Image (spheres, rainbow, N blue to C red):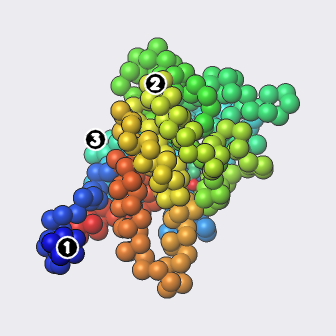
Amino acid sequence: MRIRPRRLRQTPAVRRLVRQTRLHAAELVLPMFVHEGDEPRPIASMPGMVQHSLDSFRGALAEAAGARVGGVMLFGVPSRRDATGTGATDPDGILNRATEIAAAEVGDALVVQTDLCLDEFTDHGHCGVLDADGRIDNDATLVRYAEMALAQARAGSALLGLSGMMDGQVAHVRDALDAEGFTDVALLGYAAKYASAYYGPFREAVDSQLSGDRRTYQLDAGNRREGRREAELDAAEGADVVMVKPASSYLDVLADVARTSEVPVWAYQVSGEYAMVEAAAAQGWLDREAVIAESVLAIRRAGADAVLTYWATELAQRLTTEEL
Ligand code: PBG
């Protein structure tokens, strides 16, 4: 036998030399939740994660920056909500205040990013505004997204994560930003965002008011081709980065998008992916640290240039002493 693939697996040194994919702190983005209360509030279905107070938020930002993560993605949890999500465009709204703080405190060390979507701010919990019949009004929602984009850009966000899945959102927001001179604010299109039960814990994380589902705007889990189509559309509309979400159950879509995309491709390891590992590890059923590293490595191997993960700071800290 001349061909022995095991030859390159014989020692830690040779395995290290031939590994194709590695994790780097710079490619990890930490999603963070900020609420209006004075104390951080634990999120029961995401053990270890909290809705931050502005104070604990400052601490977590410093920790993330100290670990040299690539960025943070901010979500606001407002205490008051209404039909059109006014809190999203209020410069004193919780997300815009948190953004100002992050930009001032860690804006030079990492990329401060904001979720651009109405669902945390609406009393019905949908990502858009509703028409008289209670249906999502795509084009009226674009007007709100443009206003929200300007508020976030003024607060100092460097990259806006368009997660609402309205048609035309990237082009509309790009035009609105450019018209006001915010030509350097980047756009992340949540291009292939699937209607997923893996977002379950996130709904608790943002006190979601949603009844029903998001199936008229997020992609159907059975559709592979559509993921790539959405990514191409977003890039054509001017997205600087495109996203696939969730990650682990959609690695085929991620690989498709990564193969042809001309802009960076990111993936979001979502709340349910986090919760499953934490729950199994708490039972002693999985090796927590090993599974965390393997799960993020797999997402990178499938083609993600960067990964949004709730373990970003923890992984980045491990990477200062360990190769993964
Ligand atoms: C919508 C949004 C959601 C997530 C990120 N942005 C929820 C949804 O679409 O229902 C989910 C993230 C996660 O589950 O970790 N603003």
- Which amino acid type corresponds to the residue marked 3 in the rendered image? Asp
Q: To which quarter of the image does residue 199 belong?
A: bottom right
Question: Residue, x 48% and y 23% (percent of image)?
Answer: 237
Residues at marks 3 and 2, CA–CA distance in whole angstroms: 30 Å
- Which amino acid type corresponds to the residue marked 1 in the rendered image? Arg
* Upstream in sequence: badge 3 or badge 1: 1
Where residue 25 sits in the image (x, y, percent)?
29, 56
Front-most of 126 and 241? 241
Question: Residue, x 44% and y 29% (percent of image)?
Answer: 235
* Upstream in sequence: badge 1 or badge 2: 1
Instruction: Check mark 2 vs ligand 1: CB closer than 8 Å? yes or no.
Output: no
* Upstream in sequence: badge 3 or badge 2: 3
Front-most of 89 and 263? 263
Residue that badge 3 annotates: 108
- For label 2, count other residues whose C-alpha is less than 10 Å away and answer few (under 14), some (14-19) or many (20+): few
Q: Which mark is residue 4?
A: 1
